[in-house]
Amino acid sequence: VFGTWSAMAVVEIAGEIVNDTLTFKVGWIVEIVSLSTINENLQPQTEFGRGSCVGVELVIRNIAMISKSVTLTVVAYDNLTVPMNNLELNDFKVNPGETHVPIYCELQIPKWAIVGLATVSANAYTAPLALGGKPYCPEVSARFLITPERDVSIISVTPSASEVYVREIVNIFIVVKNEGSKTETFNITAYY
């Protein structure tokens, strides 16, 4: 059972009773405690557009008394669980205690990714996967939303008249469509 354990020993030496207690932790030697998605400013973010980068921050705990070398893997899946991108960090040093690991712009969301709820998963291995590394701990995942990329387009431009005379006013009707997922601000310039 994972947790803090104690071993107690009692012995009688030359008629005197002596005892000692040893406390130790039982658990994953190296464990990914949490995974969250972050933006380019290393701030938490849960919505990312196609074509942008999704970053992750891992919190890794090492309960050993010495540093451990691990291989970290991170895989991003789109709404249909199709792998979009992955990375493998070999020979990553994890010191005893908790380590925060921000990773940004290693996982770009491709233009073909399916819009909707996506997943990013991470794991820590004893060695590179190509060399048969074994998992240190269970995989950890987080969810994020893939949104369409920015997509503003001019649908039509229609003048109020097709023939005009000097000093006549011509109104120009412009239809603009935002097919992206964010509100956009932009300038429109008309010229002849």
Image (cartoon, rainbow, N blue to C red):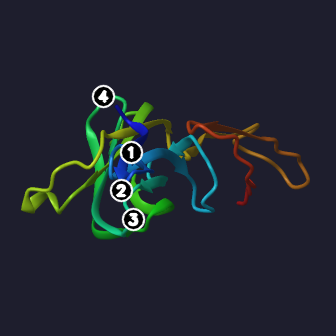
Question: Which amino acid type is shown beneath numbered disc 1?
Answer: Val
Quarter of the image that includes the N terminus:
top left
Q: CA distance from mark 4 to mark 3?
A: 42 Å
Secondary structure at badge 4 equals loop
Please tell me in which quadrant of the rendered image residue 114 appears. Answer: top left
Q: CA distance from mark 3 to mark 2?
A: 35 Å
**Label disc, if present, on residue 10 of the rendered structure:** 1
**Label disc, if present, on residue 14 of the rendered structure:** 2
Numbered disc in front, either 1 or 2: 2
* Residue located at (56% from left, 40% from top): 47
Numbered disc in front, either 4 or 3: 3
* Residue located at (57% from left, 55% from top): 39
Task: Give the image location of residue 186, x and y in percent.
Answer: 73, 53
**Label disc, if present, on residue 65 of the rendered structure:** 3
Q: Which residue is mark 4?
A: 80
Q: Residue furthest right?
A: 167
Sequence order check, earlier mark of 4 and 2 = 2
Q: Residue furthest front?
A: 15
Please indicate whether residue 32 sits to the left or right of residue 179 in the image: left
Secondary structure at badge 2 equals loop
Examine the rendered structure and indicate whether residue 172 appears above or below residue 129: above
